[in-house]
Image (cartoon, rainbow, N blue to C red):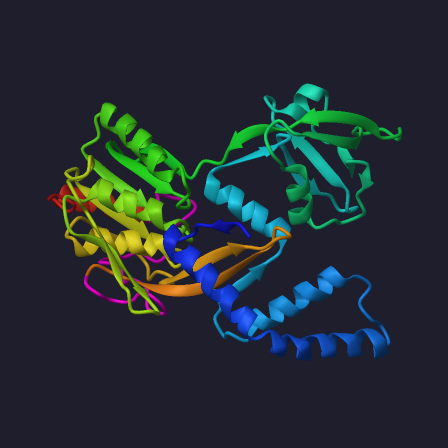
Amino acid sequence: MRILLVALQFLAIFAAGYFIRAVADSRQDRLELVSEAVQVIRTYALTPPEEELPFERAMIHAAVGTLGDPFSVYVEPAQHELQSDDLAGEYGGIGALLTIDDAGRVILTPFETGPAYEAGIRDGDILFSVDRRVIGPFPGIGDLIADLRGVEGSRINLGVVKADTDGPPISYELTRMRFEIPSVTTYLSPLNPATGIIKIIRFAENTPEEVEAGYNELIEAGISGLILDLRDNGGGLLESTVDLGRYFLKSGIVLTEERAAGEDESFRVEQPGPAADIPLLIIINGNTASAAEVLAAALRENGRALLIGSQTFGKGTVQAVVELSDGSSLHITTARWLTPGGETLDGVGLSPDFRVESSDDNGPDPFLALAEQLFLKGAGDQ
């Protein structure tokens, strides 16, 4: 069983894996009751399950549901693979966007530098089969994307019907290539070119490097103030969150992890970060959650930045992600995050220092406009 790190240190997850396995072994007799119930269903049900694997997965979903925790979940293989790619910041694939039209067909839009385009696939072509398995109407898009992804350099066969033709499918042999999934967007404020904006979409493995590269570009462009845009950021990896806290802080605690066993750990700033001096403001909204809330709280409570926007989501628990043998995974809550001041985020969230509720699509972004006003008043200065 391979263990994946998400918002928890390796050793903590490793120990949890041993604990879970030991408990399962000591309660083997209780599994006999489950086996007995399954046998009754298969023997007497008017419509017994056709396959065992979906039935087993349904039982796992139900078992996790008994925890009463919305963040402890069972994730099936396709979705787990997509989540893993997002957090890794890269994937191996064919280089094409997929959409489903009104007739339930899968329409391809290839990237001009990807394997699909180089092989001759063009916009509007219809995906007919993957590795000679015919695709039915209205397929699950997540499962299909997972099928198309794979290890860089691996081969895949696609059956494709050319757009606007009635001809038979054409067979294409493609070699998957590596594609990056950016987690950061960097640009100059449209309201003031002296203000740089770093928008963090998620906290992936490569996020600290992306932030550093973007920050250096902004400094070279001559910015005098910086905005971290954490709107609609649902969180991500603990290690990346801590690294970014240390990047923007001179000293202090980034966060404390409160574990069930009582072995709490505080993550501290060991030396001033490269971006510890630039005037800084943070934008948040109701979809700012988890690790994004942790970073916002760390920077505010250490006196580094003020928060602009609306109340955040309020997710302050940590999930260990344990990958199972079939590629699915269990996400189990194992700890709680506390802000540097010892406050919990779970079910509470963060209140902004300056409230902005929504953006006007027809005018300037009010979040950025307020940030510029605050910069003029000296907000964000250390």
Residue 33 seen by the camera? yes
Q: Position of residue 177 (x, y in %)?
A: 59, 27
| Picture layout, residue 181 above or below residue 270 | above
Q: Which of the two residues, 345 or 267, is positioned nearer the viewer here?
A: 267
Q: Indicate the quadrant where residue 313 lies.
A: bottom left
Q: Residue at x 73, y 79 (%)?
A: 37
Q: Percent x, y for residue 267?
A: 24, 53
Magenta stretch: includes residue 361? yes
Give the residues in magenta. 341-366
Q: Residue at x 43, y 60 (%)?
A: 319
Look at 63% across and 37% down and name the residue there.
Answer: 149
Q: How many marks?
A: 0
* Placement of 189 over or under 355, stated as above or below: above
Where does residue 229 sit, x and y in percent of width and height? 33, 45
| Left or right for 12, reference 153 | left
Q: Dominant secondary structure of the magenta stretch?
A: loop
